[in-house]
Structures are given as structure tokens and as C-alpha cells.
Image (cartoon, rainbow, N blue to C red):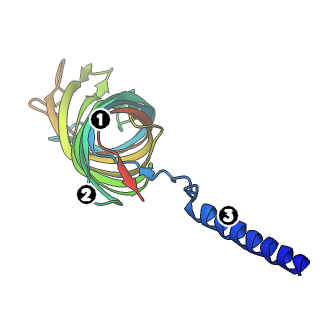
Amino acid sequence: MRRNIGWALASVVSVTLCGFGSALAADMAVKARPVVPPVVAYNWTGFYIGADVGGGWAQTDLVTFPTGTILGASPTHFYDLKGSGALGGGHVGYNWQVTPNWLLGVEADIVGTDIKGSGLGVPPFPSATEPVSRNVRWLASARGRVGLTFDRVLLYATGGAAFGEINFTANNIFPLAPNSYPFAGSSTRSGWVAGAGVEWAINTNWLIRGEYLYYDLDSFGATVSGAGPALVPGATWTYNWGHTTVQTGRVGVSYKFGGPVVAKY
């Protein structure tokens, strides 16, 4: 009898202790899972300023012809002036991140260049020569930009108004006369520009880019009188440079001022 009572008391104590332990376990705080920080998406909105270096290739058609009949002939000469050179300059602009993946912007830039092209014709007169040249001195533009963003990578198209200063020289030299029709001048031409590029945000403020631009600048013409005894009194020579097209490839670095960041959860 006593043995049975002891087993009963032990059973009651065991059950009580188990229940008390379960209650304590239920009341203990469960350790929270670590909070995962949100991914911060890059935002392109803001002003920026930067520098560019690269190279370019230009092409200009030139037609030369005299007025009047010179020694019984009125030759017309055609030239395809081509040449390449280096360029360098700067840009400034502003971007608007209009949606998480689309961007609109405006940009102005100017670069100095040394893109030359020259030719040497031989008119059908004894010892006569016709040296001609074209040299693009600088290019500038005011452009709009539209781009597709992939966080820190931007693919964009761009286009707008273009301007450039071009030096022109030409002459028809007749050493036996002697007579010549020299012209040398500089003209600021206007036109249009279009292109595309890719840009990468290294960090919040620094950007690097690669860009291609195609310029089309207006034509230019000049008519000059002879220097020296005229082969034909009152004769003149006309030089017509057609549109100058310039293709440029450049790399650049920009500094962006401020701009918000957006958290993506």
C-alpha cells in the first residue's frame, strides 16, 4: 500500500514539473529573424558636369569653278575632303528620373578639335595648281536625352542643335601669268546632331560614359577676285564647300550633384 502511494506521488510531481517547464518555454521570447536591409536603387536625377576626350572623322564636298572664260576653258573641280583628328572638351546637363526605368535629360557640350582635310587639284593650265582645305576647329551642341536605366547603367539616345567653327582655304595659282584667286576664312556653321551612348554610375556622384555623335553642319561658299594681272579682266573664282559631316567617338567622366536615392523593398 505504501509503495503504491509513493508511485502515485512521484507521478503527480513529474507531471506537475513537466507542465511548469512547458509553461516557462511558452513564455520565453522567440529570437526575431534578422531584418534584411532594402536594396537601394540608384536615382539619376540631378545636375552634372564633366569632361570628354576622343576623336572624330569629317567629310566635306567642295566644288570650285571660275566665272567667265579663262584661256578658253571654264573648269569645274570636285573634291572630297576627308580627315580625322583628336578632340577634347566638357559638358553640363540635368537628368530627370521620370519612372524607375526611364530618364529624360538636357545637355550642352563643347569640344575643341583638329579635324583636317585637304586636297590639291591641277587645273588644265600650264603649271597651275589648286590647293584647298577644311579644318574643323570646335563643335558644340544643345541636346535632349532619353534613356533606359538599369539601376546604375543608363542606355540613352540624344539629339538636338549643333554648331561648329570651320576654317576654309582655297586658291587657284597660275605661276606663268602670274595670277591667283586666294581665299582663307573662318565661319561658324549651324546644323543638327544625333547619337547614342552608355553611362555607368560608379557611385552616388561619379559617372563614366562612352558616346557616339553625328554632326551635320551647313554649307559655305565664297567668290574671290584674282590677285595679280588678270587672265580675263573681271574674272572671279567661286568655292562652294558643301555640308560638313563629322562623326565623333568619345569617353567622358561626370560629377553629379546630389540627387535622391530610392529604397526598393
156 up-or-down from 188: above or below: below
Q: In the figure, residue 123 lies in which quadrant?
A: top left
Q: Residues within 10 Å of mark 2 (few under 14, many from 20)?
A: few
Element class at badge 3: helix
Q: Name the residue beneath numbered marker 3.
A: 21
Residue linked to disc 2? 98
Query: Which of these two is toward me, 162 or 105?
Result: 105
- Position of residue 211 measured from the top left corner of the image (x, y, whole percent): 42, 45
Q: Disc 3 residue type?
A: Gly
Q: Quadrant of the N terminus?
A: bottom right
**Which of disc 1 and disc 3 is earlier in sequence?**
3
Q: Is residue 131 left or right of residue 85?
A: left
51 left or right, relative to 237: right
Where is residue 243 shown, x and y percent of the image?
26, 47
Asked if the residue at tag 1 contacts the one at tag 2, i.e. Cβ–Cβ closer than 8 Å, the answer is no
Which label belongs to residue 258? 1
- The residue at the point 71 percent across, 66 percent down is 17
> Mark 2 or 1 closer to N-term?
2
Do we see residue 136 in this rendering?
Answer: no
